[in-house]
Amino acid sequence: MQHKAQQALGAGTVEAGLRALLADTLGLAPSRVAGFTPDSGLFGALPEFDSMAVANFLTAFEERFEVLIEDDDVEAEDFATFGSLLAFAERMVRA
């Protein structure tokens, strides 16, 4: 049985959802988030993306994508760049 989020998401929409979620949870302009490339730094590079923001992001991610994230699903490296966060998001949604 496919996960609800997987059924609802087509190719590319995980990325669009992730960008919207970053804008919402970090309070960034959508146009700024739209300019993120796979190499754009996040945690440690954006002052808005601190440890509290990571916790808020993960909670919002679970709600938006209807997934449950376990502690061992998350690595610090997942938040290093937009590309690594996108890979994490795709892994969680497609699981």
Image (spheres, rainbow, N blue to C red):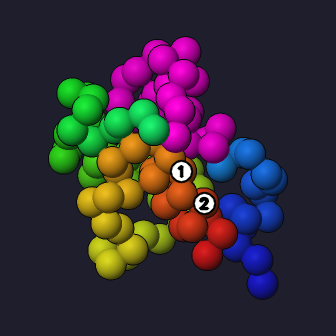
Any mark on residue 28, and which? none
| Membership of 31 in magenta stretch | yes
In this figure, which residue is indicated by the disc labeled 1? 86
Please give the name of the residue rendered at 45% of the width and 38% of the height, measured from the top-left corner: 39
Range shown magenta = 15-38
Residue 53 visible in this rendered orientation of the protein = no
Is 68 located above or below residue 86 in the figure?
below
Locate residue 93, reporting x and y percent: 61, 64
Q: Which of 89 and 8 is in front in this view?
A: 89
Is 38 located above or below residue 10 in the figure?
above
Callout 1 secondary element: helix
Task: Check contact, mark 2 vs mark 1: CB within 8 A.
Answer: yes
Please give the name of the residue rendered at 48% of the width and 17% of the height, measured from the top-left corner: 32
Q: Nearer the viewer, residue 27 or 87?
A: 87
SS assignment for the magenta stretch, majority: helix
Please give the name of the residue rendered at 35% of the width and 50% of the height, measured from the top-left corner: 79
Badge 2 local density, few (<14 within 10 Å), some, or many (20+)? some
Which image quadrant is residue 35 in? top right
Any mark on residue 90, and which? 2
Q: What residue type is labelled 1?
A: Leu
Locate residue 83, reporting x and y percent: 50, 47
